[in-house]
Amino acid sequence: METTAASSKLFSDLSPFIKLYTDGTYERITDSPYVPPILNDPITGVSSKDVTNTSLPARIFLPAISDRDEKIPIVLYFHAGGFITGSVFSETDLRYMNALSSESKSLIIAVEYRLAPEHRLPAAYEDSWAALEWLCSHVLDNTHITKDPWISNHGDFNRIYIAGDSAGGNIAHNLAMRIGSNSNPLPGNLKITGVIISQPYFWGSVEIGGEFDKDFEKQAHRVWNLCYPDAPGGIDCPMINPIAAGAPNLSQLAGPKLLVAVSEKDGFTARTAAYAAEVKKSGWNGTVEFVEIKDEDHCFQIMNPEAPNSKFLIKKMAEFINSV
C-alpha cells in the first residue's frame, strides 16, 4: 500500500524509485502525474490519444500525415522506470514520444504496463505479450477486441517494431525472445520488422568490463529482488541477465534487425555492449547496430528530447525504423 509514511520507519531506500517502510507501506519517489494527450502538438504536429477501453491502457501517437490513407511503421513501446515507476501518460513520455513519432513518422503505441510492487514480475512481461496480441488482432476479421481506427487506418502491419528504454528495453528484449521462440505464429501471421533496445536494465552476478560500482551494483540487485523476488536464478535469471550461463540462445530473437543504444556514463553500458556482441556471435540471422552516445547518462534523451545528443539518438532510432 502506498503511503506518505510520516510515522513509519524506513526499511529500504531504493532511490530514485521507491522507499519501503517497516509497516509494509511504500512511497514512490519519482511521481508521474497524468498529462492529457493533445491533438496537433504545436511543436511536432503529432496527435495523441489514450486507449482505455481495453484491458491494457495505452497512449497512441500519430504524426502529421498528408494522405489520410497513408500507412506508416508501427512501434510498440515500453517506458523506463525500473519496473517500479514511470507512465506513458506523463509529461516526459509525452514530449519524448512526440519527438520520436515526428522524427520517425511512425505510429507509436506506448503501453501502460503494470508496475511493482503492486504487480511484481512477470506481470509486465505478460502485459507486453497482451499488448502485442491486441495490436496484431487488428488484422483479423473475426475478433472480440475493440479496434482502434488510428491503428487500423494508418498502421503498416508489414513494419512492426518493438522498442523500449531501461526497464522497457528489458521488456522489449524478453518480448522479442518470446516471439522468436514461440512455435505458434502471431495473430494474422504477422512478423516483427525490428527491435530497439535502449539503455536496458540488464544485470548479473559476474562483473563485466569493470562495471561494478558497489552502490550501483547493490541498487541493481535490490530493485530486481523487489520487482521479481521469485525469479528463477535470481539476478542471473535470463530475464535480467540474457547472457548468463544456461540462458536461452540469443539466436531466437525475433526480427531481422536490432538496434542497441547505450550512453557512455550509464552503469548498464558494459553489460549491454556484451549483450550486443553475444547476439552477433549467437548465430542470429539478423543485423545488429550498436550506438554509444558520449558524455551522457542513463536515459538522458527521455528527460530532455530537445538536447543535441537526444536529437542525435532519436534520429538514429528514426533511421533504423525507416531503413530497409
Image: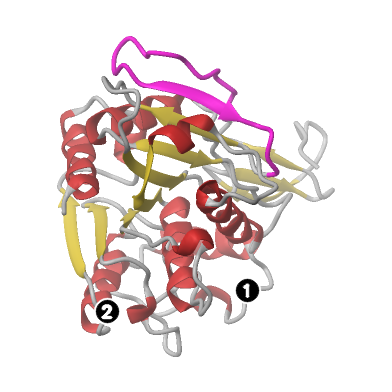
Q: Give me the residue at 44% from left, 45% from top.
A: 77
Residue extending furthest toward the top: 42
Q: Is residue 322 left or right of residue 165?
A: left
Residue picked out by circle 1: 231
- Spatial distance from mark 1 to mark 2, Cα to Cα? 26 Å
Q: Is residue 11 visible?
A: yes
Residue 41 in percent (x, y) is at: 37, 14
Q: Which mark is residue 239?
A: none
Q: Main secondary structure of the magenta part?
A: loop
Residue 62 in percent (x, y) is at: 39, 27
Question: Helix, strand or loop at disc 1?
Answer: loop
Q: Is residue 82 visible?
A: no
Q: Which residues are magenta?
A: 32-55
Q: Which mark is residue 284?
A: 2
Question: Helix, strand or loop at disc 2?
Answer: loop
Q: Give me the residue at 30% from left, 72% from top.
A: 275
Say few, some or many: other residues with alpha carbon within 10 Å of mark 1 (under 14 / 14 to 19 / 20 or more): some
Quarter of the image where the N terminus is located: top right
Of the pair 148 and 68, the residue shown nearer to us: 68
Q: Is residue 12 left or right of residue 273?
A: right
* In this view, 193 is above or below 273: above
Of the pair 315 and 186, the residue shown nearer to us: 186
